[in-house]
Image (tube, rainbow, N blue to C red):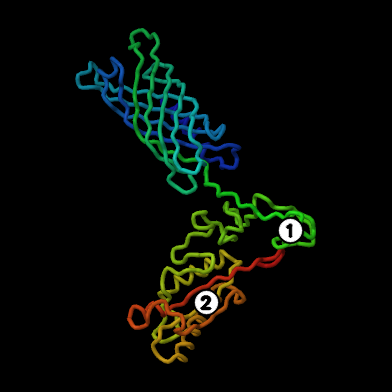
Amino acid sequence: MTKTIYSTRFLLFASALLVFPTHAWAVDWGLKLEPGMAAPVGDPQNRLFGPGFGASLKGLIGIGRYLDAQAGLTFVGLPARPAAPSTDPGGAWGLGVGMRLKRPHDLPRAHSPWVDGDIMYVRTGPLDRFGFTFGAGWSAALDEDRRLWLGPFVRYMQIVQGDHAGADNTDAKLFIVGASLEIGSPHRQKPKTIECVVAEASDGDRDGDGVLNSVDKCPDLPGPALTYGCPDRDRDGLADVADVCPDAPGPISNRGCPIYKKVVVKPDKIELNEKIFFAWDKAEIEPQSYPLLDEVVLALKDNRSFRVRIEGHTDASGPDSHNQTLSEGRAHAVLEYLAKHGIAPERLAFKGFSSSQPLEPNDTVAGREANRRVEFQVHLFIVGEGENK
């Protein structure tokens, strides 16, 4: 019954850490699970019990970049050795509080060695005891936001037995070795600060607000000068001046663009990972290419400041006049598909190039196949304040 009460209290505490949203805390938080193999190292425990199981569940609250306060529950279970006087296994439950010193999780390299220590209230059978632990480990981030960390650990645990009549009064000493899994606050790597251009007195600044006329959206109306902390419309941690997709949040590793499966958004074009298939010698899109074009639609909806010119190309087979008509027709067919699926027509343009821009020589089957294509070229424009995106 006592064990059940302690387990229930701790589970309620751990659940509270997960239920409260991260932004409700002024500091970082985390929840760590440490399963492993436990073995007694002191006499007489190592004669009575063999290697068994040990585990800890801890809640963490950051009180600085390098230091965490922690509280948690530890369990150790040891089987009796065959030659021991009793066949009863050894077990202990402990509630502890302590501190952890770690390498900050927001530093450039995503790994974190750590050491910690706890003082504990320990329950062994019917007895209440005092205990303490010291641990050390190393963990590495498993995801880009650095919410999940995994790595090995080793822990020394000592249960102070005290003076109890009729009981073993020797301190129990154990080592626990295992893996540590931690989940907590995100620690997305911050990009290098991009400095916005600020005018000197001689650089041309009509309204005197400290911003160059060439980059001042309101050159005749004074406004706040931006030095560091450039605008970031989509709040993905990458400034608009360096963000290829300033209206759609995406990881810094992908230049601020969402990660799509079939297309790649680049500074000057939307690159297709698959070909668009058309009916033979016609400007009719095959249904197998609809998923690809649907993802192009998604990329354009995510990035409402993109204007796109759709370019159609053919190989050199057949008359040039026919190829010109075919390349224009296929490019226009793609434009119509995008427009029917919610992309404003004024954001779209098309052009046919016939066979004038081959990717490969036209004297092979593979070359002619590569030259029959539709390309997307992206044009960016700046949306003024109050304009419809």
Rendering coords of residue 78 (x, y %): 30, 25
Residue at figure coordinates x 48%, y 35% from the top left: 103
Q: Could you tell me which quadrant the N terminus lies in?
A: top left
Name the residue beneath numbered marker 2: 310
Rendering coords of residue 334 (x, y %): 50, 78
Q: Relative to 371, is 227 on the left or the right? A: right
Q: Is residue 71 above or below residue 197?
A: above
Helix, strand, or loop for circle 1? Answer: loop
* Disc number placed over residue 203 in the picture, else none: 1
In the depicted view, which residue is nearer to us: 150 or 351? 351
Q: Is residue 217 above or below residue 16?
A: below
- Crowding at mark 2 (Cα within 10 Å: few <14, some 14-19, many 20+): many
The amino acid beneath tag 2 is: Ile
3D distance between C-alphas at marks 2 and 1: 40 Å
Rendering coords of residue 32 (x, y %): 44, 35
Helix, strand, or loop for circle 2? Answer: strand
Residue at figure coordinates x 50%, y 80% from the top left: 331
The amino acid beneath tag 1 is: Asp
Sooner in the amino-acid sequence: mark 2 or mark 1: 1
Q: Is residue 55 above or below residue 365?
A: above
Q: Is residue 64 above or below residue 255?
A: above
Residue 286 at least partly seen: no
Q: Relative to 305, is 71 on the left or the right? A: left
Q: Quadrant of residue 221?
A: bottom right
Rendering coords of residue 7 (x, y %): 43, 29
In the depicted view, which residue is nearer to us: 13 or 174? 174
Q: Extreme left residue here?
A: 83
Q: Could you tell me which quadrant the C terminus lies in?
A: bottom right
Q: Quadrant of residue 140?
A: top left
